[in-house]
Amino acid sequence: MKLTSKGQVTIPQELREKYGLLPKTEVTFEEGDGGVLIKPAAASRRREAERWLKRARGSASVELTTDEIMALTRGEK
């Protein structure tokens, strides 16, 4: 893998998926022993989670009340 003249590099898809590096994810760079560590910025992870929750909200297909769901999770009949 080569660095472009603009200092850009493509992060392999499997690593982007594993570490939640979605488009527009903010990252931080940390110097380490002989290299550089790229990490998602903490605030960025929160924004990504909020976006995911916003997309997921209202997508449940089972119409149960909260009490019915709680009874199921507790093993009550």
Image: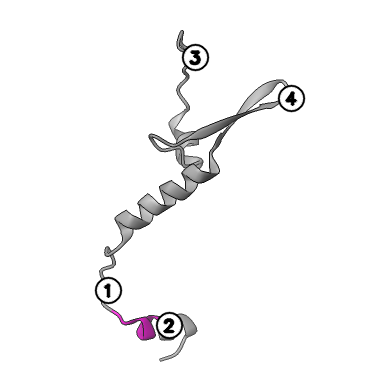
Q: Give the distance between the C-alpha atoms of the residues marked 4 and 1, in whole angstroms.
A: 51 Å
Q: Name the residue under label 1.
A: 62
Q: What residue type is labelled 4?
A: Asp
Q: Callout 4: few (<14), some (14-19), or many (20+) C-alpha neighbours within 10 Å? A: few
Q: Position of residue 70 (x, y in %)?
A: 42, 82
Q: How far apart are marks 4 and 2 (CA)?
A: 49 Å
**What residue would you read off at disc 4?**
33
Depth check, mark 3 against mark 2: the one in front is 3
SS of the residue at dot 4? Answer: loop
Q: Mark 3 points at which residue?
A: 7
Q: Nearer the viewer, mark 4 or mark 1?
A: 4
Q: Give the range drawn in magenta.
A: 64-70
| Residue ranking furthest to the top | 5
Asked if residue 5 is positioned above or below residue 32 in the image, the reply reads above
Residue type for callout 2:
Met
Q: Is residue 39 left or right of residue 26?
A: right
**Disc on the earlier residue, 1 or 2:** 1
Check disc 2 and report the residue beneath it: 70
